[in-house]
Image (cartoon, rainbow, N blue to C red):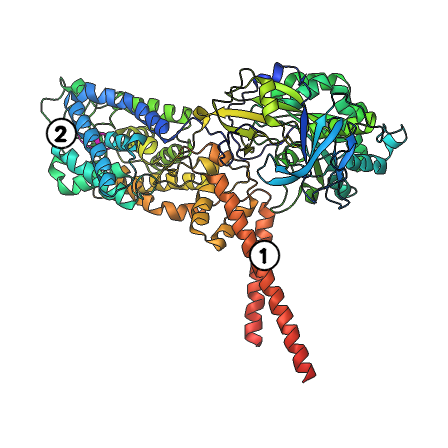
Amino acid sequence: MPFKYYGGVHPDYAKTASKTPVRTISPPPVVVLPMIQQIGAPNRPVVKVGDTVKMGQLIGSNDAPVSAPVHASVSGKVIAVEPRRHMLGDMVMSVVIENDFQDTPCEDMQPLTAEQLKDPEAIIARIRAAGVVGMGGAMFPTAFKIQGARGKVDTVIINGAECEPYLCGDHRTMLEHPEELLKGIELIRIAHGLDKCYYGIEKNKQDAIDLLNSLDPAKYGVEIVPEVVKYPQGAEKMQVKANTDREVKPGGLPSGVGCNVVSTYTAYTIYRACYEGIPSIERVVTVAGDCVPEAQNLLCRFGTPLEFIFKEAGADMSKVERICMGGPMMGICVADPTAGSVKGASGLLLFSKEMNRESETPTCIRCGNCIAHCPMKLEPMYMYMYVQKGDIKKMEEYHVMDCFECGSCSWGCPGRLPLTHTFKLGKAMINAKRAEEKARAEAAKINAEAAAGKEAKA
Amino acid sequence: MDEVKVFKVTSNPILRTERGTRQIMLDVIIGLVPALAVAVYMFGAKVVLLLAVSVVSCVFFEWAYRKLMKKNTTVGDLSAVVTAILLVCVLPSEAKWWMVVIGSFFSVVVVKQLYGGIGKNFLNPALAGRAFLTAAYAGYMTVWAVPAALAGSVDAATMATPLSYLYNGQAMPEYLNLTSIFLGARPGSIGEISTLALLVGGLWLIARKVISWRIPVSFIGSVAVLCLIFGHEGYGRLDWTLLNLCSGGLVLGAFFMATDYSTSPVTLRGQLVFGLGCGVLTVLIRYFGSYPEGVSYAILIMNCCTWGVDKLTRPRQFGISAEDVKAAKAAKKAAKAKAKEGAANG
């Protein structure tokens, strides 16, 4: 039975693609693979211009613990190693591969043996080698996440909420690959060294819940937990609360209360890496929005230029005002459609001007919706005021750092205040201030030591 | 390479709810329609005239002030229209049209715009306008016309309100019984007379999620409980309570005035405290005040406390349990004691 939590909103879920089977798009002639598709250390290209690469071959890596390698998503010839525009805006070192349309598989990675599939070390090593990151959008290296939580957590929660409007990739994966998914979840559970784990799924995916339950999830050590349909059900902290009634402490991680949360598509990617020996090179992307004639779920190789995907979806690009990567609540706007898609892009939404409700003159009418909606039980209205004033002390008093930018406050704001955005700025201001104070304290310590040394000498 | 179109970038969330300020204000206006319909039936066409004058002058004053001050135009959000209607609702039907113009000016310019406009004023504009007019034109503000439904029973142009009977502890005339008062066949301010119509409008606001149940329930609830406890000589306890709930401006105040966004707390517990405060003050004024009606002053007084109520009723953030708060308090106390000890020793 899922536990309740405060706040949240009910946006129009618009999950029109939930009945549409996943379709593999035609292979793109060129892929642009940025060396940063994860949180942590950027990868260094390990191929050079002119090299012939196979599908699944390692093309970028970094030995730092917080990182995830990148693999060629097609076979062909490397035609450029240079900075290219990343979906998220920066110019990032990228490997550009010309597709030879042969899909020659790389033999470097083999399926794990039956013994290895029971060995947590082997599973984690494979997750790392396959470049698996949090596919829900966070892109945090999964191997590091599991390694760090091992032995410390007593509960693993697989996140199947998919609470963002429009997105249906996880839902379709549950329906089309239920057995594989359960096996992937089993691997995650084994990697954590636990006997049982929860799989939280929002009740609007009843068909998937029924299907998974019919496959005897207990056999895999999985308990399906049907969850209330409410945004942000899929946020880590909400998942922990809903499944275990534990509340992550302010500034803490789920592992602080003995939990680890892994998303659905991550589990499926882990299945493929371990059972099939295929690294993380593709994912389901929901392409939807009012500029797409029909919402669809497309299986896209990473690095596929966005404009190629849009063409494939039959989008009317002349109408498009904004391109959103991820869901509309926490997603990020993409300015340049020539960028290649990355691991965290669960959705690509194309919205026309009619969907833009931002205001030139945002005005707070003190309706209190933001306070009623904030799942962290904060007071966005007052936080907004203090961030605007630049009052760091008040910002801390009103817990601006606790905001995880789910967007519920801004979504429900009739005055169209840029609340969420302002808190991003506020958090940056607080971090800058803290860094400054730390530096000052350090400098004072160094100077005091130097002065003491001088005195001792004298 | 072809020329690449660069797309617009906004921060998350990319989408927002359809319901903007304008839709909310429109819902409030719709919620007032039943009460206004009863008013027009009971008091005749002059209500329509007053409404027209009020809407035109409120919108004009808001537009003109913001134009003069070179600020953006806000009349499109319809909040001036809501103020205009609410101002008429709290006036007697005998009010003169020029009083409405003066009241509109005070409400919109002095109370609302001088503090920065919508969301910034700390007093309810319509109630402040009524308070101003009561002070300035007490004569016009205390004359109560006989409603159409009572024209056969009362042989005069004006009559006393049910609340003044209650205030003086007199028995009410036969034609003023609980049913007639509840339905609206009674003298009183234009918008307050029909409890039934106001309940319909109030439930509409709650159903549309324009307001929460907290303020109306704690406001009306606290008045009911206090009236039940204290009662009044010569009235049955239940009769006294129900008459108190339906006779004055309580229902109008609880659903449409006390819930005004700008002037009521935004925290959920704060809203309960606010409603409770309004209820207690209303009863105090009705029992001990020098004036039979207490709702408008109770709300205006609580309006002044809104900021403080918000600060005192802050929610406990996610991840902090009641024990955590206790522990933090104990730690603070210990630190203080230690500092004191240190100061005493040093």
Please report the bounds of the magenta region as a residue range.
B87-92
Q: Where is residue B56 in the image (x, y as percent from the top left)?
A: 19, 29
- Whether callout 2 and callout 1 share a subunit is answered no
Q: For this rendering, which residue is in front, A79 or A240? A: A79
Residue in the picture at 33% in, 43% down: B120
Which residue has dot 2 on it?
B94
User: Tag 2: residue type?
Assistant: Glu
Q: For this rendering, which residue is in front, B312 or B196? A: B312
In this rendering, position of residue B109 left or right of residue B203:
left
Q: For this rendering, which residue is in front, A151 or B8? A: B8
In this rendering, position of residue A31 left or right of residue B212:
right
- Establish if A325 lies above or below A450: above
User: Tag 1: residue type?
Assistant: Ala
For mark 1, name the chain.
A
- Establish if A42 lies above or below A282: below
Find the residue positioned furthest to the bottom.
Answer: A458
Residue in the picture at 62% in, 65% down: A442
Q: Residues within 10 Å of mark 2 (few under 14, many from 20)?
A: some
Q: Residues within 10 Å of mark 1 (few under 14, many from 20)?
A: few
Q: Position of residue B1 (x, y in %)?
A: 57, 29
Whether residue B303 appears in magenta in the rendering, the answer is: no
Q: What element carries label 2?
A: loop
Q: Position of residue A187 (x, y in %)?
A: 80, 30
Residue in the picture at 46% in, 37% down: A370
Whether residue B89 appears in magenta in the rendering, the answer is: yes
Q: In which quarter of the image is residue A353?
A: top left
